[in-house]
Image (cartoon, rainbow, N blue to C red):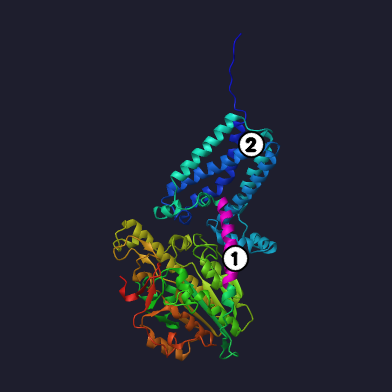
Amino acid sequence: MSLKFSFKWPKARELGLLFLCYALVLLPPFFAELWKDYSGVYYLYDSRTSYIINTLLIVALLSLGLACLTQYLGRFQKFFFALVMLFLSFLGMLALIHVALYDAPISVGAVDALLGTDLHEATEYLTFHWTKAMMLSVGIYVVLYLVALLVAAPRLRRGRPCAPSHLLGWSIVTGLVLLAYQYPAVATYNLERFNKRPIWSRAAELNRQLPSIRILHDIGNWVAYRQWLEEAQHVRASHDYGASLVDPSKPRTVVLVLGESLRRDHMSLYGYPRITTPLLDARRKQLLAFDAAISPSNQTVPSLTKLLTPATVQAPDLFLTEPSILSAANKAGYHTYWLSNQGRVGNFDSLISLIANDAETTVFTNTEFYGTVYDEALLHPLQVALSDPDPHKFIVIHILGSHQSYQNRYPEDKNYFHAKDYAGETPGPAPLEEQATTLSQYDNSVRYTDEILDGILKELEKQPGSALLFVSDHGERLFENGNGTCGHGFPEPTRSEFDIPYFLWCHGDCPRRWKRAHARHRSIAFSTENVFHTVANLLGLEMAEYHPQDDILSLKYQPVRQPQIIDVNRGIHTYISLP
């Protein structure tokens, strides 16, 4: 009599099949983001490589965990499997469609756009923007789901997992958990804070690295944002400017264009040797350009909250209780618009959205910074706004301009400047090739902004009584002062992060009083935290909150001897003290 010994893991094959199905639905948007090389996806992590490794560990961990859980459910496992696959496929499809539609990673802004629409509007939008990439995104997930139902589901058998597969699955899950937490991908400067968080919070943070699961986290942030927004709007609504029009019979169309990361010394309009603003140069005689405008901050939110509200460097939080110039315009009878190619919700956008919601009509053509939706997308909403028969219109246009990554701010056919043209012009210690490439890309973004502004001005030329004020939110560091860095928002700021363009265009010709004020104040250093008062002047508003001594277009303007700025840590400095 011979003894035969055979050892089978009947459920291990099912475990592997379940793992494969779950992993396949999680991976496509992740691979799409890696292929697109979205710096914004992993900018908070220590390196791209560790981000990739850590995320793949999390995919494996989540997939195995779901696979083990599915095996425990006995006769309900097929139903549970179909339901989870449908849910993950839907999330993955949304993430992949967002990449196809906006060329950007999924974000809270995208969730806001999705949940803030209705079926008719969504259908109309998708019909207009339907592309082959979107068809492919939908097709990938339809195929994955059908294969899971038709191939994988029939192979699942009722019953509990046997001990070997049970032990194998949970051993691998445990190992992956230890790996993921032992080697988190978060950057060193966030690691200490990350390690102090409770285990559930750390798990949620790690899972944010998966585009599909990130949507769930973004939905939570969106709910919190909406609640905060409602409360903040209620507080601000209690403040009434009581504004009125000085001359209601005079039609006015005022456009305020908010630039992004644009420094004036890279504009040929201000003497830059490269022709980066040829179209504005051709209009030089039509413009009242100021030569020494200084932004109050080197970041978008603290800068624009001071530009558009009574908030100042000395009282930076006033915008939370007092509304913006848009609210004053509404009170005076203007139809107000906010047209933006930046995000509406997120770490960089929520406080700006608070101001945007002061407008009667809001249009967002993008969901966040890291996409490649070009600013020309704003021209059609502008045309729609200008077609409004209301004689009084105030339109704020918020462009992406020259925000990093610079190469994403202009189409490939607008690539006028090349790295080879910048040989010998590298100001900092960073690698010469990197600097030359960055400078050429930045200048290309400036030239593209020039084209966008010219397109806006061509539309306004059809509008008698129109005026345009352009001001950038802040400047940009481009390797100067011995720094091997570029960008803005550095804790130790430099002057280049605050030197910005500021100019006015009027249909026909600007009023004589504005031209006289320009001649008197053109070269005086002034902070753009006073834009609130200048726009009130442009709109022809009469209200107690308007201070002519703070309005650069008023002959009563009183210059500040040493304009101040506020840094990212809310420290206050005089502009002249900066390197």
Query: Which residue corresponds to mark 2?
Result: 71
Q: Which residues are magenta?
A: 212-232
Q: Quadrant of the C terminus?
A: bottom left
Is the residue marked by circle 1 packed among few (<14), some (14-19), or many (20+) residues within 10 Å? some
Left or right, 556 with reference to 340: left
Query: Residue at image x 43%, y 68%?
Result: 299
Residue 531 percent location from the top left of the image: 46, 80
Q: CA distance from mark 1 to mark 2?
A: 39 Å
Query: Which residue corresponds to mark 1?
Result: 226
Residue 275: mark in rendering: none
Residue 564 percent location from the top left of the image: 37, 77
Query: Residue at image x 44%, y 44%?
Result: 182
Residue 274 against residue 548 in the figure, above or below: above
Residue 314 against residue 88 in the figure, above or below: below
Left or right, 489 with reference to 380: left
Q: Quadrant of the N terminus?
A: top right
Residue 158 percent location from the top left of the image: 69, 33
Query: Residue at image x 59%, y 85%?
Result: 332
Q: Is residue 230 magenta?
A: yes
Q: Amino acid at mark 1?
A: Arg
